[in-house]
Image (spheres, rainbow, N blue to C red):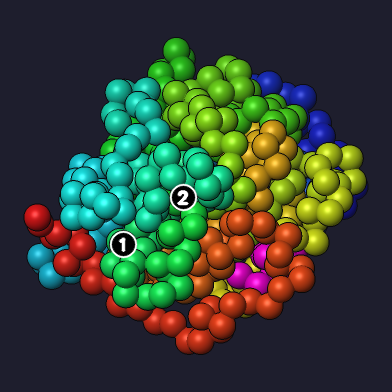
Amino acid sequence: MKSFKMGLLAAVGFSAALAHAAQETSRTHYIEVQTNNKIERSLVTRLGYAIDEVRSDKVFFLGNEADVAKLARLNLKAKAYKMQSNWTTQDDLSPEAARYTSYSEVAQQLQNLAASRPDLVTLTTLGNSLENRDVPMLRISGKSVAEAEAGQLPVIFYMGCHHAREHLSVEVPLLYSKYLVEQYGKNADITRLLDTREVYIAPMVNPDGHSYDYTNGIRGKMWRKNRRPNGNGTFGVDLNRNYGWGWGTGGSSTSPNSDVYMGTAAFSEPETQNVRDFVNAQPRMTTLLSFHTFSELILYPWGGTYDKVGEKQGNPADLPVFEKMARDMAAWNKYTPQQSSDLYIASGDTTDWAYGTHGIFSFTFELSPSSMWQGGFYPSPNVIEPTFNDNIKPMLYMLEFADNPHRVLTEKTPSFLETPVKVGIGIASFQDLQL
């Protein structure tokens, strides 16, 4: 224990080690480092590594054999596993095979969906990316904007793909948009919710990074960040370390080489500015869900401090709401519910900012699979529909309680969420939707 902490603390002071802790090229191995608790895991993130997987006694991240040598010089027990082909799935490329969705396909599908139900769906935008790509977003509500404003309807925001390689985080909110539209007018509970809520869905917050990473609909380049030229031959800022609440206070890096590079300032990136400006303009927003992969977790603030909500920041009355909501949702998708910093410190993330700045009940879902050995960032596209089915009830639960999340402490879960649900959402037909 002593040598572990001394090695890490010493390493944090070595700028050269930090600058090269996570190279953007030659990430050919999965690195394992022995750790025993959240303190030790957080010290690993201070070296500039983006932890991808957490176990009780170790963490894993992408790197190369040189990282093992560096860690060994810092008295850290590490080993490297050669990347395996099954970690970047090699599925059938036939026309019938399930695939992940490209940026252009996402944009087209959202446009088609809006055109199919103009009474319910509006295609809008979060803004533009660094490389000037539009960031498409849907508004779904049975009420017009004017009616929603007059009725003071609660707003809920679902979004995916802060991190480029997390392709499954695009698919779940994308398919959820179709599910809501299909069910409106058929399912009394969905109709009720959409008539009394404003739903916004942005499946791809980071279109530049996703477009760079996306390959053939089944795998990618293991790219995490956006595509910011950093001026030293490297690219990218970690968008989920670039938000303003607690920016730069731990679990991120000042090195542009790092996968958790936090940028030159809070909200330095147009992609995070897009989210900030939209949320700032929505005073009725009560609830937010950000999709990521992988690990099968439900996370809530704080991520930038070990303090619990209400100890030093936030409303003490909100903590039992976060805990109850996380437990309830985990009962359906079987993920692990926990405070984000129980994993490790990560400052400047979306949910800390949304809750800290606006009091929005904000969650992160780390979707399937549970490990790199089960497909990691690129599981078989055949998991898209089962993962969506696993998360229908959690997403609807958040929608149900968006009017007042504190209701979860005093009211029973509505009966429509208690009955078994397994919905085939017709992935292929959605991708080919024509007007």
Could you say where residue 94 lies in the image, as x and y percent from the top left?
11, 66
Residue 324 colored in magenta in the image: yes
Q: Position of residue 206 (x, y in %)?
A: 40, 37
The C terminus lies in quadrant: bottom left
Depicted 293 relative to depicted 11: above or below: below
User: Residue at point 29% right, 42% down?
Assistant: 123
Q: Residues within 10 Å of mark 2 (few under 14, many from 20)?
A: many
Between 412 and 240, which is closer to the camera in this rendering? Answer: 412
Q: In this orientation, does residue 288 appear? A: no
Determine the main secondary structure of the stretch shown in magenta: helix
Q: Secondary structure at mark 2?
A: strand
Which residue is more in the foreground, 264 or 57? 264
User: Residue at left 65%, top 27%?
Assistant: 244
Highlighted magenta segment, given as a residue range? 323-329
Q: Is residue 209 above or below residue 391?
A: above
Q: Position of residue 407 (x, y in %)?
A: 71, 64
Of the numbered discs in the image, which one, if any, rests on residue 198?
2
Q: Amino acid at mark 2?
A: Glu
Q: How many numbered dots are placed on residues in this image?
A: 2
Q: Is residue 266 magenta?
A: no
* Residue hosting label 1: 181
